[in-house]
Amino acid sequence: MKLIECPRDAMQGLAHFVPTDLKIQYLNALLQVGFDTLDFGSFVSPKAIPQMRDTTDVLAGLDLSGTKTKLLAIVANVRGAEQAVAHKPINYVGFPLSVSETFQQRNTNKSIAQAFTEVTAIQSLCDQQGKDLVVYLSMGFGNPYGDAYSPDLVGDFTAQLIQTGVRIIAPSDTVGSSTPEAIEYLFTHLVQQFPEIEFGAHLHARPGEGPAKVQAAMRAGVQRIDGALRGFGGCPMAADTLTGNLPTEEIVQILTQQGIKLAINQEAFQKALTLSAGVF
């Protein structure tokens, strides 16, 4: 199981700007923990996500010596991808593709059809520069807009993505509406149908809901799971402000209880956990 820490997702919706130096301090602390991947920033319009306007400066301040943690940056279009792949330390480029037409328009000002065209171009850029593309299927467990949804529809999206060369796909519970039953059903269906794909889970939850959702993803054979220390962040479009990212400390506890060995430095983990209180 690959553990993906997502400070970018945790920070991006904050009303106050986290100073660049503090971002760097926090991310450098996270780099010492032993996470597989750090979702550290995004190359998007500063008008859309003001919090991430300093991603290039943050990247320059990261101390990557002595860490095996890989870096992931989110982009919303080809222009952002061109910026991301130009940075050698970045291993993964993440792109949000929505199963909901309404959310795709709201999130990236593009239709789903246009977004698939972007995916094809971004995959080509990643191939050229030796990066891996991670496609997040937003609204992967339903949507509040009345747009069509079913697990089979997620499977159809996955099949189309495979045709473009994508090999890492993460259905995402954007508004925290999923249940453990729905999580297990969807991922079991996907893992069995597309065994060649590395499936990840980007889930949101209310306090107390995280453990059951993590366990459901594990039972279904998910290979990577996203979290954020203390459960900070989450989609601002969720109806409940208590809905946030899966708390990483809960994920670590559950994986450990299930006998999954994680290369986590506990001292560094506690330091980052303490520092997170000041950041947020």
Image (spheres, rainbow, N blue to C red):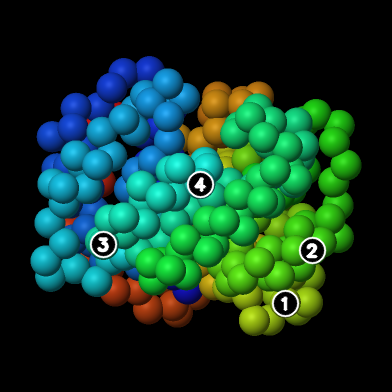
Q: Which residue is mark 2?
A: 155
Tell me which numbered mark, 2 or 1, is placed earlier along the sequence.
2
Question: Which mark identifies residue 78?
Answer: 4
Question: Do the residues under discs 2 and 1 have CB atoms within 8 angstroms?
Answer: yes
CA separation in Å, label 4 and label 2: 24 Å
Tell me which numbered mark, 1 or 3, is placed earlier along the sequence.
3
What type is the residue that disc 1 sits on? Answer: Phe
Question: Which mark identifies residue 194?
Answer: 1
> What crowding class fits label 1: few (fewer than 14 Cα within 10 Å), some (14-19), or many (20 or more)?
some
Tell me the quadrant of the picture where the C terminus can be found: top left
Q: Which residue is mark 3?
A: 88
| Observer-nearest of 170 and 243 | 170
Tell me which numbered mark, 3 or 2, is placed earlier along the sequence.
3
The residue shown at (64%, 81%) is 196
Question: Do the residues under discs 3 and 2 have CB atoms within 8 angstroms?
Answer: no
Secondary structure under tag 4 reads helix
| Observer-nearest of 145 and 270 | 145
What type is the residue that disc 4 sits on? Answer: Val
